[in-house]
């Protein structure tokens, strides 16, 4: 397999690490929320929302959960949490 083909395949198919890097980059560069960044990323790359949970690693899930609690999308947990 040529290097060009490998690069094209990597661009098309995302692994959890690459997906997390892309989302973190979008959040950092555009001041968007994690949730909005994931939605925009999926729309731009024709990724179905149903396949996203498989792509989200645990650290990113925790950030999304924290953000959802701050936006009152989820009930706030009674456990102590560190600010992100």
Image (cartoon, rainbow, N blue to C red):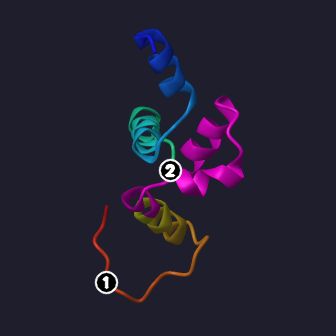
User: Residue extending furthest left?
Assistant: 82
Magenta stretch: give its range. Answer: 34-61
Report the label total: 2
Point 65% across, 51% down: residue: 51
Looking at the image, residue 81 sits to the left or right of residue 64; the answer is: left
User: Residue extending furthest bottom?
Assistant: 78
On screen, 9 above or below 38?
A: above
Point 45% across, 18% down: residue: 7
Which quadrant would the C terminus be assigned to in this image?
bottom left
Q: Are marks 1 and 2 in contact (CB under 8 Å)?
A: no
Please state the horizontal and vertical placement of residue 83, each as a whole percent of the image. 30, 67
| Residue under label 2 | 34
- SS under mark 2: helix
Point 61% across, 70% down: residue: 73
Looking at the image, residue 44 sits to the left or right of residue 64; the answer is: right
- On whether residue 15 falls in the magenta region, the answer is no
On screen, 49 above or below 77?
A: above
Point 57% across, 27% down: residue: 12
For the stretch drawn in magenta, the main secondary structure is helix
Q: Earlier in the sequence, mark 1 or mark 2?
A: 2
Which numbered disc covers residue 80?
1
């Amino acid at each position: 397999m040529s290097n060009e083909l490998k690069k094209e395949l990597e661009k098309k198919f995302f692994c959890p690490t690459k997906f997390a890097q892309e989302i973190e980059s979008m959040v950092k560069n555009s001041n968007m929320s994690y949730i909005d960044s994931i939605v925009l990323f999926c729309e731009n790359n024709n990724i179905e929302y149903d396949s996203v949970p498989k792509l989200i690693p645990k650290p990113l899930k925790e950030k999304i959960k924290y953000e959802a609690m701050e936006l009152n999308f989820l009930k706030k947990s009674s456990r102590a949490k560190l600010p992100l």
